[in-house]
Image (tube, rainbow, N blue to C red):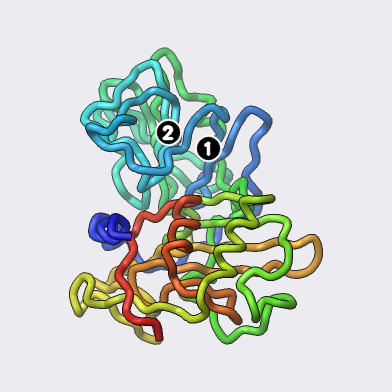
Amino acid sequence: MAAIVVATVIGLPRYLHLDRTAAPSIGGVTSTATARPGFQTVTFHGLSITVPSSWTVPNSWLTHGGEDCSLSREYVGLPGARLQCGSTDTPSIAFVEFIEGDDPLGLTGPIKITKTRISGIAATRTDGLWAARAAFGYTVPTLRASVLIVPAQGQTGADLAGSLQVNAFDSHGCPAAVADVAELPRNKPPAREGAADTLIPGRPTVLRVCRYVLGRIEQGTALTGPQATGLVTVLAHLPPGLNRADPDTFSPELCHTSAGDVNTIAGNDVASDGEAYRIQADYPVGKPVVVVVRLGLCGDLGASNGSRTGQRTDALVKAVTDLVRNTGGISPLLPVR
């Protein structure tokens, strides 16, 4: 856990520049991301790109001096898991990186900007250079997301650009925007029989594990079989109750809880404790069960389905972060209340 606590300090500046606006609807889009055989579709904030299945999606930082800090295969990078090397330019290899909010694309001149639309949603295309290679990116303000596309030498990247879509659900069934993860649910009737006794009752057919920041999808996955059973077991063994983040981790004035702004870090009227996990258990018949998990940075932490709670444990942290990562950090805890 020590390494994850350290990550809190690294992740905090990233959160402090995000606004507190609720995730908007996806402009009337209702589609689910799909890919034909041999391809995969990666979705970030509802912006989707389709690449060959052979491309990797890194699940950790690749830093300068690290063994894997080289561009040896095509990849799709998500914020919090991308190459951070002194030089990563391998002209024979293409790559894609999603970018949070209004962060820059990293292109240099000459720059050309063109207005366009993706799935009917207003966007801009920016053409320029990346490490002396022709590259381009698309920015979708409504989604607070951009994507940088760096084609391999001799390629145009037109196939990648042509695959861009806006989707209401990613390929794992995670909604692109949600409003039910801002805080841990409580005092709700059980979603189905047994949900008051255990977080995920019975035998679900699939678990959809989705990580959000300020209600926007960052990464998702779907579990079946032994993987799903393993996560259900972790949730079943959580001690009942919730933990409380230690507000003195940063400084006394950073963490606060109020009726209008639950479980946030506040500074200069910006929100930051916006990372949360949503686990949806689907069954052959009947209603699904949704478990919200919050690992940090402030307020109540742990897991809840609205009628049953579970404390934040090392096993819970490992289970969800191994699947869909954590980019905001994990705060120390006060004694259980």
- Dot 1 falls on a residue whose secondary structure is strand
Callout 2 environment at 10 Å: few (<14), some (14 to 19), or many (20+)?
many
Residue at (44% x, 47% y) in the render: 140
Observer-nearest residue: 237 or 97? Answer: 237
- Dot 2 falls on a residue whose secondary structure is strand
Residue located farthest toward the right when viewing the structure as drawn: 285
Give the position of the N terminus as an image quadrant: bottom left
Q: Position of residue 263 (x, y in %)?
A: 38, 76
Q: Which mark is residue 49?
A: 1
Q: Position of residue 219 (x, y in %)?
A: 49, 50
Residue at (53% x, 60% y) in the render: 177
Task: Choose top left, top right, bottom left or bottom right for residue 105.
Answer: top left
- Amino acid carrying label 2: it is Val
Residue at (36% x, 27% y) in the render: 135
Callout 1 environment at 10 Å: few (<14), some (14 to 19), or many (20+)?
many
Query: Can I make out residue 114 in this image?
Result: no
| Left or right side of 12 for 185 | right
User: Where 3 sits versus 114, above or below?
Assistant: below
Q: Earlier in the sequence, mark 1 or mark 2?
A: 1
**Residue at mark 1 to residue at mark 2: CA–CA distance:** 9 Å
Observer-nearest residue: 20 or 4? Answer: 4
- Amino acid carrying label 1: it is Ile
Give the position of the C terminus as an image quadrant: bottom left
Q: Which residue is mark 2?
A: 96
Task: Choose top left, top right, bottom left or bottom right for residue 163.
Answer: top right
Residue at (32% x, 79% y) in the render: 334
Dots 1, 2 in contact, CB < 8 A: yes
